[in-house]
């Protein structure tokens, strides 16, 4: 039972089906671990033990009568607190929503419930999911289980921390600027950012609840919903369950993701892009990534130092411009007007991240249209790359998990190779991929000398999500896969 909490969701589901453990027993095991291990990290921030226990009992009773609810029958999971779940508050880290109790489940959550999952709690996020740290006025700060003085990342920080500490079996997150990938990297777990537009976002906050109550809703630019887990197999299972058109499109559309491009590691053609002057990678991170690439090469992988014909600096600029437009659309009228006035007074020579944010947040539609056109050109260049290569390996972030920093977002800095760089650099490599809507899987590949986990970003062709997930699965036997932080392993 000591290792039970760290098994994959696929393994746990099989154990329940084979009646090696009951859903009730597994749920109690996780609830006891949350009681014991959650306080120092504050990853699980809302629980509904009564409803979860009742559902677990129903799952066991159904199984005894020969009923199978699906591939997650009776498996306890948690959900990021930006997704609406009936019976649990959904705050998105906002004090104004601390009492918000949803009337229906988010679409992606419902898909997991339809497969038999038992939701036992919610995990922490920053305010409206808008930070690389996971701290808010409702639930406080979440700490990294590898080092509690550091952040688990954001915005799916509570999700990644809960998985790493063995407090849950599977998580549902969301990603607009690395919000699945960076926490997975910081906490040493797996995460998958899907291709843009293949997982329904309805029931995610933002946008604010109660605005879109029918079948139609805003599909936020760049943002996607996707799974975090302790194995690539779990990512594949979760994507099978949650991939679907938006509800309004389901009358005529279906999504059938293609199988992985290759079957064996040696068959894959792999591009590598491990560093760039536009977003330099800290040597402690780079050394771990290079060691993983070297291990793959020794195992017979066909690796070429080749990247798409795109400029990282230019891609990051387009990413932050379009991301800022999303932030501007979500601002209050008063806040938007304030940003507009400040932006109008900025000097053209001011190219700080703050200045770029203000310009992007208040830009005219003509400007946004031109940025989007440049994005489509980038998408074409990536598509050309994937005619010759199956995946690209690159950093998730230039740094490992960072120390907590409570300063204003644009005042923060991070040390990279003993040089202070803007905090937003932590999102650069994630933005490179996110802005063009490509699928990307994060797989743990090693530990730094100071004991922090490192993940690698496996980028795949558009709509070929199963290819990077499958490649991550093939890597597990070579670079080790998930390893729990020892403090959270039962003595």
Image (tube, grey):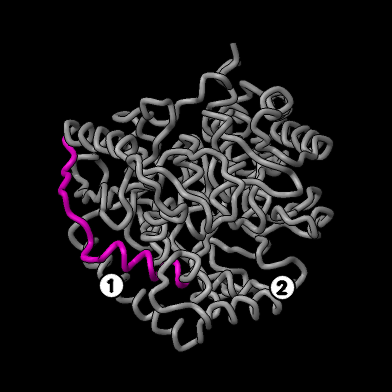
Please provide percent x and percent y for residue 477: 32, 29
Q: CA distance from mark 2 to mark 1?
A: 33 Å
Q: Which residue is mark 1?
A: 380
Query: Which image quarter: residue 333?
Result: bottom right
Q: Residue at x 27, y 65 (%)?
A: 382
Please provide percent x and percent y for residue 426: 43, 51
Please name whichever residue, 351 or 83, is drawn nearer the observer in this view of the structure: 351
What segment carries the magenta color?
300-322
Q: Is residue 129 magenta?
A: no
Per the image, label 1 sits on a secondary structure element best described as helix
Q: Residue at x 51, y 86 (%)?
A: 364
Q: Which residue is mark 2?
A: 212
- Residue 472 in sight from this viewpoint: yes
Please provide percent x and percent y for residue 81: 68, 50
Horizontal relation, residue 425 to residue 312: left or right = right
Q: Quadrant of the C terminus?
A: top right
Q: Residue at x 60, y 40 (%)?
A: 72
Please provide percent x and percent y for residue 161: 58, 36
């Amino acid at each position: 039972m000591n290792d039970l909490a760290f098994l994959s969701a696929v393994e746990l589901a099989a154990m329940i089906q084979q009646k090696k453990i009951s859903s009730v027993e597994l749920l109690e095991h996780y609830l006891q671990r949350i009681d014991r291990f959650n306080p120092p990290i504050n990853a699980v921030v809302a629980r509904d033990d009564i409803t979860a226990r009742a559902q677990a009992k129903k799952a066991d009773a159904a199984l005894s009568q020969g009923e199978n609810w699906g591939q997650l029958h009776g498996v306890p999971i948690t959900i990021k607190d930006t997704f609406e779940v009936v019976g649990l508050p959904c705050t998105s880290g906002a004090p104004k929503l601390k009492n918000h109790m949803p009337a229906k489940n988010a679409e992606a959550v419902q898909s997991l419930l339809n497969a038999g999952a038992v939701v036992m709690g919610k995990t922490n996020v920053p305010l409206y999911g808008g930070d690389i740290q996971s701290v808010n006025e409702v639930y406080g700060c979440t700490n990294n289980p590898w080092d509690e003085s550091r952040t688990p990342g954001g915005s799916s920080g509570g999700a990644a921390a809960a998985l790493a500490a063995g407090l849950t079996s599977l998580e549902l997150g969301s990603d607009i600027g690395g919000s699945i990938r960076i926490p997975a990297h910081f906490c040493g777990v797996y995460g998958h950012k899907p291709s843009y537009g293949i997982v329904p976002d309805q029931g995610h906050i933002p946008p604010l609840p109660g605005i879109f109550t029918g079948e139609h809703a805003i599909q936020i630019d760049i943002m996607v919903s996707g799974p975090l887990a302790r194995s690539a197999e779990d990512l594949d299972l979760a994507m099978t369950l949650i991939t679907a058109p938006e509800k309004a499109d389901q009358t005529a559309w279906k999504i059938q993701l293609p199988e992985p491009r290759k079957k064996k590691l040696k068959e894959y053609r792999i591009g590598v892009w491990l560093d760039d002057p536009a977003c330099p990678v800290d040597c402690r991170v780079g050394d771990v990534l290079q060691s993983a690439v070297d291990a793959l090469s020794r195992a017979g992988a066909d690796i070429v130092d080749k990247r798409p014909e795109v400029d990282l600096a230019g891609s990051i600029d387009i990413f932050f411009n379009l991301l800022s437009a999303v932030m501007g659309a979500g601002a209050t009228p008063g806040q938007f007007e304030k940003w507009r006035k400040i932006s109008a007074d900025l000097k053209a020579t001011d190219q700080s991240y703050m200045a770029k944010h203000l310009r992007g947040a208040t830009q005219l539609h003509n400007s946004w249209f031109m940025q989007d056109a440049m994005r489509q050109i980038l998408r074409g260049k990536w598509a050309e790359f994937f005619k010759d290569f199956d995946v690209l390996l690159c950093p998730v972030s230039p740094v490992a998990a960072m120390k907590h920093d409570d300063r204003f977002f644009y005042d923060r800095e991070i040390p990279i190779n003993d040089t202070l760089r803007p905090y937003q650099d932590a999102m650069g490599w994630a933005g490179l991929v996110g802005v063009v809507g490509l699928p990307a899987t994060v797989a743990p590949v090693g530990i730094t000398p100071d004991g922090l986990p490192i993940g690698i970003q496996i980028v795949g062709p558009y709509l070929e999500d199963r290819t990077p997930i499958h490649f991550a699965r093939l890597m597990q036997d070579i670079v080790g896969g998930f390893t729990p932080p020892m403090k959270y392993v039962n003595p």
